[in-house]
Image (cartoon, helix red, strand yellow):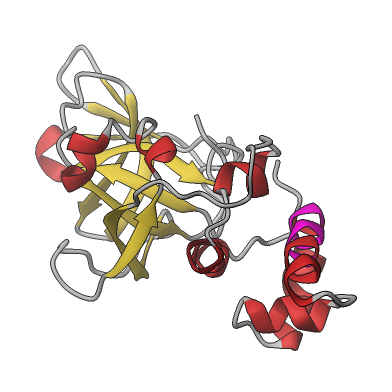
Amino acid sequence: MLDVIKIIEKLKDVLATEEQKKIFDKDVAKALNISQANFATIKQRNKIPFSNILDFCALKKISINWLFYGQDPSSLIDSTDKYWIKYFPSVSVSAGGGAYDGDDDYEKMEVPPYFTNMLGGIENMKNIEAINVTGDSMEPTLNNGNIIFIDKSKYDISKDGIYAFVNENGLFVKRIQKRVDGGLDIISDNKEYPMQVVGKNEIKILGKIVGSFGSIF
């Protein structure tokens, strides 16, 4: 599990090197465009503000792999070309609700080349979109606040996996398994939530979850 305290300390190191002075939490909050009150809550709850950090990394040209996973690049500067995918910050899945048509209200999310491999390669970027997770129904695989990446070219549910889908109750992300009778098992990884069985025509598959910030599976 990613530790927000360790990530904050790395951000302080980056800012201290850049500004040549001692860096405090308020300086990191300002750099991430987060209020000091919200920043304190983030630390207390170990809730990582992924979208703010992604913006910071893009601005400072910092390796995401180094910041999140401790992989030591030869330099903090990532000079390689970047690629973009659509990110819908106002769309949330897992707890239901919201709307998502894949056309409006998106921001461009910068994705460095080394991250594109996890998403199917550079040529597949046109099929990838990112949205947020709300709720705990898919813990520990996906946690509240994660950003997840949907491959909209993968909607064949004959292959088990985690999919984003809509039904009459809203927008969800669940593990889906096809039954021998043609029905679908809708499974929450959090065992506090019961499995549901639905007909294949009761849901519309939006795409398969191929990765996330917060946990990669």
Foreground of the two, 27 or 167 = 27
**Relative side of 79 to 66, left or right:** left
Say which quarter of the image contains residue 205: top left
Q: Position of residue 82 (x, y in %)?
A: 34, 51
* Magenta stretch, residue numbers: 6-12
Q: Position of residue 21 (x, y in %)?
A: 87, 77
Residue located 50% across and 69% down the image: 59
- Give the number of marks: 0
Q: Is residue 42 above or below residue 190?
A: below
Q: Position of residue 180 (x, y in %)?
A: 20, 12
Q: Position of residue 179 (x, y in %)?
A: 24, 17
Quadrant that contains the N terminus = top right
Residue 98 in view in this figure:
yes
Q: Is residue 177 magenta?
A: no
Q: Is residue 186 above or below residue 177?
A: below
Residue 203 in view in this figure:
no
Say which quarter of the image contains residue 195: top left
Q: Taken as a whole, is the magenta stretch helix, strand or loop?
A: helix
Residue located 17% across and 61% down the image: 102
Foreground of the two, 73 or 154 = 73
**Relative side of 110 to 65, left or right:** left
Residue located 64% across and 37% down the image: 74
**Relative side of 140 to 82, left or right:** right
